């Protein structure tokens, strides 16, 4: 497996390996510090980013390489050069490419033409780097993953929800998604996540009722109600539709006794989560953000040393 575009492209062994490598980089941040010596990693971000941009840049630096930010206005892509030509040229200088953009198809086209690893740093459909850091955080906190329930409450059809669901399935976790009508995972995504979860002893439940999703959950997870690239005109409608899906103290009290709160960030206090919950003692949101760095290191390391087998 050359690239990391989607969690679902990985085998269960690949995900377990990334978590093991990431835990190793937590213990020894400067391990493999010569891997990228003398090499660059272009980082193309067509959407804003704080965590992903900085954690991947730090990960490249820790592995001995130099991250080079290339904004959409700087590349000749802006003037019509094709994605394929850009990919081939990047392959002559770079060790890997990190890309955040809108369409998944653009990242797939880049990966198909690039002779070097391409890492999806968030698209409209997926956020694999986040999901790796998320499971690392759950494993770090609880000591295990298998059989634990993650309740995702909010926009169940977005990139973060999709990648988290795919990762939970590979890890044999029980995923429960609560979202309003029109914001649950699509049929196809759900069927494939259920099949994968079934292979590893996990499950995927979807419901309109947040209380049903969080019952017995170890983790209550949410994300913004309007993602980057979603039409701004939907904001008011979504606020009303998601109103009953806010993660507040009352909802946390319905989860497992030892339940933690998670959020990929950035957060909107007073919308998808209350300040009391995200800033409270059960919140792992900032631990997740910190874990983006060893997770990115693990992904870069595994791809550059060709250790991911891919889904069979
Ligand atoms: N969680 C996450 O990907 O944050 P950024 O958008 O700041 O990168
Ligand atoms: N779903 C959010 C995640 C941001 C990290 C978005 O795509 O905007």
Image (cartoon, rainbow, N blue to C red):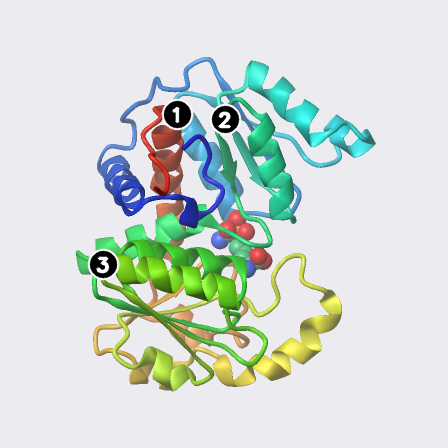
User: With 190 as the anchor, is 70 left or right in this view?
Assistant: right
First along the sequence among labels 3 and 2: 2
- Crowding at dot 3, Cα within 10 Å, few <14 / some 14-19 / many 20+, comes out as many
Q: Viewer-proximal residue, 122 or 59?
A: 122
**Image quarter in which the C terminus is found:** top left
**Image quarter in which the N terminus is found:** top left
- Based on the displayed image, in which of its 4 quarters is residue 181 positioned? bottom right
Farthest-out residue, left: 143
- Residue holding disc 1: 304
Label 1 sits on a secondary structure element that is helix
- Crowding at dot 1, Cα within 10 Å, few <14 / some 14-19 / many 20+, comes out as some
Position above or below: 154 against 231: below
Q: CA distance from mark 3 to mark 2?
A: 30 Å
Label 3 sits on a secondary structure element that is loop
Residue 145 is marked as: 3
**Residue drawn at the location 26% of the way across and 72% of the way down:** 259
Label 2 sits on a secondary structure element that is loop
Residue 196 location (% of width, % of height): 34, 57
Q: CA distance from mark 1 to mark 2?
A: 8 Å
Q: Viewer-proximal residue, 198 or 231?
A: 198
First along the sequence among labels 1 and 2: 2
Residue 125 location (% of width, % of height): 56, 54
**Residue drawn at the location 53% of the way across and 70% of the way down:** 155
Residue 96 is marked as: 2
**Residue drawn at the location 53% of the way across and 22% of the way down:** 115
Would you say the residues marked 1 and 2 are in contact, meaning their CB atoms lie under 8 Å apart? yes
Q: Viewer-proximal residue, 281 or 178?
A: 178
User: With 254 as the anchor, is 109 left or right in this view?
Assistant: right
């Amino acid at each position: 497996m050359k690239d990391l575009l989607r969690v679902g492209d990985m085998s269960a062994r690949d995900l377990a390996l990334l978590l093991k490598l990431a835990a190793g980089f937590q213990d020894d941040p400067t391990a493999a510090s010569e891997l990228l010596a003398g090499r660059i990693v272009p980082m193309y971000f067509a959407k804003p980013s704080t965590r992903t941009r900085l954690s991947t840049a730090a990960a490249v630096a820790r592995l001995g390489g130099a991250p080079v930010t290339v904004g959409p206005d700087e590349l000749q892509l802006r003037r019509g050069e094709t994605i394929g030509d850009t990919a081939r040229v990047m392959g002559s200088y770079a060790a890997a490419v990190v890309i955040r953009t809108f369409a998944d198809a653009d990242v797939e086209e880049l990966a198909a033409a690039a002779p070097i690893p391409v890492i999806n740093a968030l698209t409209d459909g997926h956020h694999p780097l986040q999901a790796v850091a998320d499971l690392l955080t759950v494993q770090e906190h609880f000591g295990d993953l298998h059989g634990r329930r993650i309740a995702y409450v909010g926009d169940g059809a977005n990139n973060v929800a999709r990648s988290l669901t795919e990762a939970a399935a590979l890890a044999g976790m029980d995923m429960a998604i609560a979202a309003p009508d029109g914001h649950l995972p699509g049929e196809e995504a759900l069927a494939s996540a259920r099949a994968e979860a079934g292979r590893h002893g996990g499950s995927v439940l979807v419901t309109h009722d947040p209380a049903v999703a969080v019952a017995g959950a170890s983790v209550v997870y949410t994300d913004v109600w309007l993602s980057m690239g979603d039409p701004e005109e939907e904001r008011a409608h979504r606020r009303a539709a998601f109103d009953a899906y806010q993660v507040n103290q009352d909802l946390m009290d319905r989860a497992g006794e030892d339940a933690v709160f998670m959020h990929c960030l950035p957060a909107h206090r007073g919308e998808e989560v209350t300040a009391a919950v995200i800033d409270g003692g059960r919140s792992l949101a900032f631990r997740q953000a910190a874990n983006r760095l060893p997770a990115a290191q693990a992904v870069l390391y595994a791809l550059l040393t060709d250790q991911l087998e891919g889904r069979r």
